[in-house]
Image (cartoon, rainbow, N blue to C red):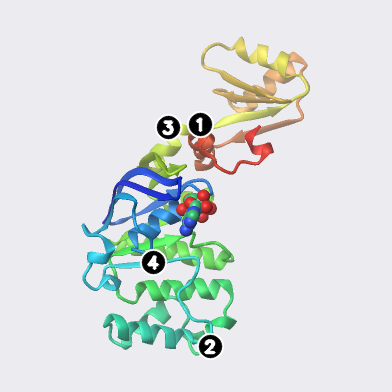
Amino acid sequence: MLAVRELTKRYGDRTVVDGLTFTVEPGRVTGFLGPNGAGKTTTMRVLLGLAAATSGEALVDGRAYRDLPRPALRVGAVLPSGPAHPGRSARAHLRAKAASVGVPRDRVEEVLEQAGLAGAAGRRVGGYSLGMRQRLGVADALLGDPGVLLFDEPVNGLDLDGVRWMRGLMRRMAGEGRTVFVSSHLMSEMEAVADHLVVVGRGRLITDAPLSEVIGAWSRTHVEVRTPDTGSLGECLAALGPRVRVEAGAGLLRVFGPSAAEVGDLAHGAGVRVHGLLTREASLEQAYLELTGGAVEFASAEGAR
Ligand SMILES: Nc1ncnc2c1ncn2[C@@H]1O[C@H](COP(=O)(O)OP(=O)(O)OP(=O)(O)O)[C@@H](O)[C@H]1O
């Protein structure tokens, strides 16, 4: 289990994590979601003892990382930097680590197998593809058979096979009762893998809730209509009464309530030209945009509009 309590991290006069409190429970995949620069990596680094908290605490199984006896047996992390020296083979790297953390040598072959790297284990890591380096990161994290696993943007740079494999691995690890905490800014990825979400923006907690609850509360299936005559169609829709809600944009209406067929028929009946009609299902992406709209640190001018 992970517990972050009132965690604050400052770099100079910049507060990048700001009084963050949440727990990550075992037996499920918890997604750690937030815009670029929201403080996800920093929080993970504090949990892993790689950065010091300015105040508050970040605990693994009730203790700060530095106070964990044999931490590699408690917590494993898959980080974007990857674990190994490029001149070494994966096997040599893992054997050295096994010796230093007191894990039997046989375990190296097991984790190489689990990570799908057995066939390439004798090759220099410097020649590995990004996907193979990610797999080595997984083998490294699993070496001590830890109950807690952290993944920082684990599918970055992976091909479809790699993405599916990584998803399966995270689900399996949670199914075995481990604590699985995974950061990402990829909505589709989180929707596919997470049971629970911790969403942050500008270092602060935005929400901590089951995935289904986040989608249910912050996103609704609706119909998107592109029309050069938003005014007339908007009026027809408003006449349908309170079961219909309409949001207007430039040449675009978002219609909550009726189906796409109803909206299309209504437009046809009213002689309004429609250039596009699309059902947008409730999704994490929609929910996330609602939730984090005000918290994006590096928005493009287009995004900000
Ligand atoms: N060592 C450091 N010194 C100074 N500033 C830092 C340091 N590490 C991170 N930051 C800043 O802290 C902020 C939060 O960064 P962090 O990497 O934790 O965010 P993130 O949520 O993981 O974002 P991303 O999705 O872009 O990785 C960023 O603005 C970053 O520039």
Query: Please, what secondary structure does the residue beneath circle 3 have?
Result: helix
Q: Residue at x 55, y 62 (%)?
A: 156
Q: CA distance from mark 1 to mark 3?
A: 8 Å
Number of other residues with Cα within 10 Å of mark 3, as a class: few under 14, some 14 to 19, many 20 or more:
few
Q: In this rendering, would 244 be left or right of 65?
A: right
**Real-space CA distance between mark 1 and mark 2, rounded to the nearest whole angstrom:** 50 Å
Disc marking residue 220: 1
Q: Where is residue 248, by image quadrant?
A: top right
Of labels 3 and 2, the one closer to you: 2
Exactly how many numbered labels are in the figure? 4
The x, y position of residue 61, in whole percent, is: 23, 59
Q: Is residue 72 left or right of residue 44?
A: left
Name the residue tied to disc 4.
77
Q: Residue at x 53, y 32 (%)?
A: 221
Helix, strand or loop for disc 4: strand
Q: Residue 247 occupies which quadrant of the picture?
A: top right
Question: Counting other residues with Cα less than 10 Å from the Cα at mark 2, is it few (<14), some (14-19), or many (20 or more)?
Answer: some
Say if 66 sits above or below 208 in the image. Answer: below
- Frontmost of labels 1 and 3 is 3
x then y, percent, for residue 233: 70, 17
Label 4 within 8 A of ligand 1 by Cβ:
no
Identified at 42% across, 62% down, the residue is 151
Badge 1 element: loop
Residue 123 shows which numbered tag?
2
Image x and y of residue 97, in percent = 36, 82
| Disc number placed over residue 229 in the picture, else none | none
Mark earlier in primary sequence (1, 2) = 2
Do callouts 3 and 2 mark residues in contact (Cβ within 8 Å)? no
Tell me the CA gap for discs 3 and 2: 49 Å
Q: What amino acid does circle 3 point to?
A: Ala
Q: Nearer the viewer, residue 94 or 229?
A: 94
